Image: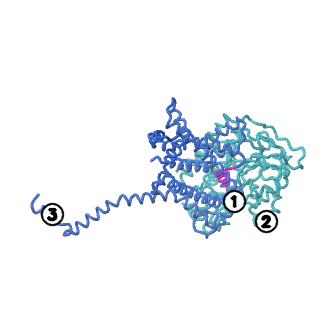
Amino acid sequence: MTVGSRPLILAVALLAVLALAAGCGRDEGETAVAPAPKDPSAPATGTLRFFAYGDTMTDEMLAPFLKANPDLDLQKASFNSNKAAAAKLAGGFEADVVELCTDEMEPILIRNLIRPLDPKAVKGFDDLVFSDSDDVRDEAGHVLFVPASAGPHGLIVNTDQVSGVDSYADLFDPQYAGNAALESSPLTAIGVTSMGIGVGDDPMDLSPPEIDEVKQYLLDNRDQFRDFPESDASMANLFKSGEAVIADGGRGTTEAMIRDGVPAEWVAPKEGVLSWVCGLAITSSAENLDAAYKLLNYYASPEAQAISGEQGFVAMTPKALPLIPPEFRQGADPSSLETAIPETQPSASDLYDRAWQEVAAG
Amino acid sequence: MSGATAAAGRVPAADQPPVAHRRSLGSRIRRHLPGIASVLVIAFAMLIMFGPVLMLALFSFNDSSIISLPWEGFTTRWYDEAWSTPEARDAILNSLVVAAVVTAGSLTLGTLAAWGLTRLRFPGRGPLAGLHGSVLVVPWLIIGVAGLIFFSESGVSLSLTTVALMQLVVTFPLVVAIISAGLVRFSRSVEEAAIDLGASQGQMLRYVVLPQIAPSLAAAAIFAFAWSFNNFEVSFFTGGFEQTFPVWVFSILRQSENLPMVNAVSTVIALAQVIVVFAGWRLMKRLTRDRGGDKALTELLTGGAR
């Protein structure tokens, strides 16, 4: 499971649309910290509008929340990227809670489409993985969202044909020439390669010369790669058919392959694990703040994170682990994310995009 | 020409078996070559067009969440899973309702507009026709966002109604184009003859015009329904908290495990669309009293604009 790659053309189109929406859309909403509910124990009532990825708001996940708040009318709308969500919100669509992912939330932040929240109003906030990260805060130190899901990104190997792998540099090992794969995402592809060849200190914030160096290395070694899969499904296909034996990718993707009988293993490289991080934020147009906080509290709870763990995500709080069935516990263990580098939008994200475009085009 | 040569030229073909055979084979190849080439080209085109859909249908029965060979065994569990997913059922139902409304609306408005553009003479007819067509070249993404901003500024809550209204905007010009083509092909003198023979305007429309443009109407209906049902961009931006099928599909594809279920639902929808076209073809045969099925099908798929 990755927040992963989106086709560049769609991204450019959405940015254009975002500009259109920015010019003609609604006025900016409330940007002050959302006040905490006066009575946090009272069940939520009224209408709560929830705007998120479809797999974040499954029936299984929301059933306990709805049972605990029987008088709440929960309305759900889904999107397929934060860029699309930003365009829709900027155009005037109104929701109370929206899902953000650190690698693509910039359009939402720039337009002030969310308002900071009070972490004291979210029980167990400090137990959540990444809760102390700068990436969940704005420049003033206000918390922007409650981390609700994450997934480590490292190496996937075919255990029948590959062994002793522990570095992103192994993606470029000549013995795997023509049988390696690199996920087609500018951020992870450039980041993973930079770590593999030792360029730059922060893979999520390379300087322009460093990006150029990584790009040139990828161009020089392009034949190393069988393909640049656009999705988890394509990656799984490559491994199942035997076309790829080593690739970068998420642990969730690897576990899905293993469940399907593919001899695969996920490896945490010594250079560090990347991780996508998504969470829930309160929009600047939110009307039902009490219910919004109720939902944020639910997603931060060990009970909700246990359900998330059973669905293949990493539980964001260690308190959820005892509630997760043993067969899912290892995959859901948040300790794998303790030293992970969050995937965030780089300051030179357009250079990442352009560099990857050149590599992918050959 | 010498006498000997002339004499040889008059020898019956039966007495020259090798030459005659070669000529016969060559001429036979020449005669059949266009037909063989046509079959090959059509087969290739069919493979390119329908191969992916057939693969999708095939893998919807594969007992694996990975859409790849080797074959892991036959299963119908993806269909069971899709059927037991309320979001999938709701999304399909929403898309069917919206597509039905959009089809009916665009056919009504499109027929009236096409009639006016092809049968009436008034100042500005050309620019008005161009205005209709211009919507067809504007990206749906832009139309979707424009619709969102329009509804937002107007204080209209987003819902399936707003989705249907904006889809009507993008579908209606297509219907106008298809039906206009049918009307242009249909001679106006036949309408005048009906009036001269005592038919009222209503009778003329019912008994003369409608049967003639029936293939165009059927084609427009099919295309309007398909455009509406498959539309993502407009539906995403102008939809509220009830999602259509394409929006649901895009929202769940983040997890690769959902792919086989989407395959199963898509297979059913593709099959349903084939059945709709087949039903339309049968209807055309009945309406046009055309015993030649191929002609009726071609008329249907080209909107009678051949």
Q: Is residue A98 left or right of residue B76?
A: right
Q: Determine the image quadrant of residue A138.
A: top right
Circle 2 chain: A
Write down the chain letter for disc 1: A
Q: Which residues are magenta?
A: B243-252
The residue that mark 1 highlights is A252
What residue is disc 2 on? Answer: A325
Residue contact at pointers 1 and 3, CB within 8 angstroms: no
* CA neighbours of label 1 inside 10 A, class few (<14), some (14 to 19), many (20+): many
Horizontal side of residue A144 vs A237, given as left or right: right
Q: Which chain is blue?
A: B
User: Residue type at mark 3?
Assistant: Arg
Asked if the residues shown at circle 3 and circle 2 are in contact, with their CB atoms under 8 angstroms apart, the answer is no
Tell me the colour chain A is drawn in: cyan
Distance between the alpha carbons at the discs numbered 3 and 2: 96 Å
- Image mark for residue A153: none
Secondary structure at numbered mark 3: loop
Does the magenta-highlighted stretch encompass residue A145?
Answer: no
- Residue at mark 3: B10
Q: Nearer the viewer, residue B153 or A217?
A: B153
| B302 to B259, vertically: above or below | above
Q: In which image quadrant can residue B82 be found?
A: bottom right
Q: Quadrant of the N terminus of chain A?
A: bottom right
Work out whether residue A36 or residue A207 is closer to the camera in this orientation and state it. Answer: A36
